[in-house]
Image: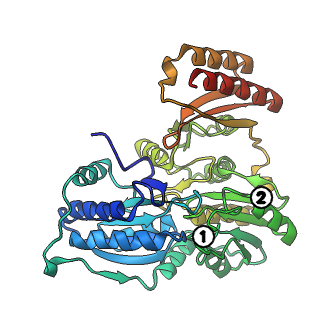
Amino acid sequence: MAREFFGTDGIRGRVGQYPMTAQTVMKLGWAAGKVLASKGNREVLIGKDTRISGYLFESALEAGLASAGINSRMLGPMPTPAVAYLTSTFRAAAGIVISASHNPFYDNGLKFFSTEGTKLPDELELEIEAMMKEEMTTVDSKDLGRARRVEDASGRYIEFCKSTFPSSLRLDGMKIVVDTANGAAYHIAREVFDELGADVISVGADPNGMNINKECGATAPDNLRAHVLLERADVGIALDGDGDRLIMVDHRGDIVDGDEILYVLAKARHKAGTLKGGVAGTLMTNLALEHAFEALDIPFARAGVGDRFVMELLRERGWELGGENSGHIICLDRVTTGDAIVAALAVLAVMRSTGETLEGLRSDMKLYPQVLLNVPVAKKVNLDDNEVIQAAVRQAELDLDGKGRVLLRPSGTEPLVRVMVEGKVANEVQEICQRVANVVGDALD
């Protein structure tokens, strides 16, 4: 069955445009409610980020669920991983997050979690898709769902995050800048690090409904870098709007991305003998990380782009650690999805236990220059079948002489082809990427 609503990371779009309209979201709430009610559990958790449209979609979603006989527990602004965790602890039928993650405020979306706190299984998504084709009805008045607010949701999640940090360690004497992107973790992240003893400088923690991810957070780490240098902090931590992406900054002001964070965590676990199996990355993972793992004899495998595919690969291999260079870090021994706060705590634990700076922990793995260009295209096409494009790729790979990679990836949400080239020489990588991008643009114009 072809999917109309669910993508690799739920449902997302421009507010006011299909499917992110009040009518469609209410119908989605009803369809999800009908499917979930048929399984017997009638409790659903609803969280959101700080977008102004969250109020609109929260009300629409609750109305749709109620009409299907589902009770809603309203969490208010809450990071995506917090909703996943709370869904599991409440034994709810599902958790729903109203968020467009790292996108601007004028976008929004829905993410669904199962009762185990994992992404909703494909079969349930397909059942909801099928139910959307049915006419919306309302259960008898006595069977209507009810909504009530969970007053201590933030406190529950804060305590959970702290529980993932070794009980023998504290963060006393460590100055940390935390940038929460004016997003869902604005009222939570600071408390976690503060209660563990850190001196916390909080930025990006004044949401107004329209400044989420705006020149701050994990997608704009220069804001964090500036504050780390200004405050002479030991480390900086940046989350994205829904709190599942992590980018860090070391005391020198250098940005530390998801690949480098994975390296720090994997190397520490490998040395301690606690790394279960290997590490999962994606097609976008820097080749330098793969080479570094080879040198350490750590198994490594690539999944498709998206934390959902990383999770699938981890489960398939029986591994526990994986992530993306964009900052989704998954520690399956601690959480069921990407969690920026928990991942940051894992890095801080390595820093505390070793006495090393973040710069020192990552210094023996240098990322290769990587250039990514987005090429607008007029039509969708199978890139593998286009001989002109494939010839350009083959020539690029010859020019890299086995010391780099070329990756072409159509966007799943926009009329774009993403052209990525990486290698050891920056100027060479830039020139090759531009050349391939020009060929793709001409071929698909």
Quadrant of residue 223 within the rendered picture: bottom right
Callout 1 environment at 10 Å: few (<14), some (14 to 19), or many (20+)? Answer: few
Pointer 1 or 2: first along the chain = 1
Which quadrant of the view contains residue 409?
A: top right
Amino acid type at image mark 2: Asp
Q: Secondary structure at mark 2?
A: helix
x%, y% of residue 48?
47, 70
Image quadrant assignment for residue 329: bottom right
Name the mark on residue 166.
1
Looking at the picture, which amino acid does disc 1 mark?
Answer: Pro
The quarter of the image holding the N terminus is top left
How far apart are labels 1 and 2 at the CA level? 30 Å
Q: Using residue 398 as the reference point, say whether residue 40 is left or right of it.
A: left
Q: Categorize mark 2 by other alpha carbons within 10 Å: few (<14), some (14-19), many (20+).
A: some
Q: Position of residue 11 (x, y in %)?
A: 42, 54
Q: Quadrant for the C terminus, please.
A: top right
- 356 or 337, which is in the foreground? 337
Q: Position of residue 366 (x, y in %)?
A: 77, 41
Which residue in the protein does label 2 denote?
222
Q: Residue at x 81, y 68 (%)?
A: 227
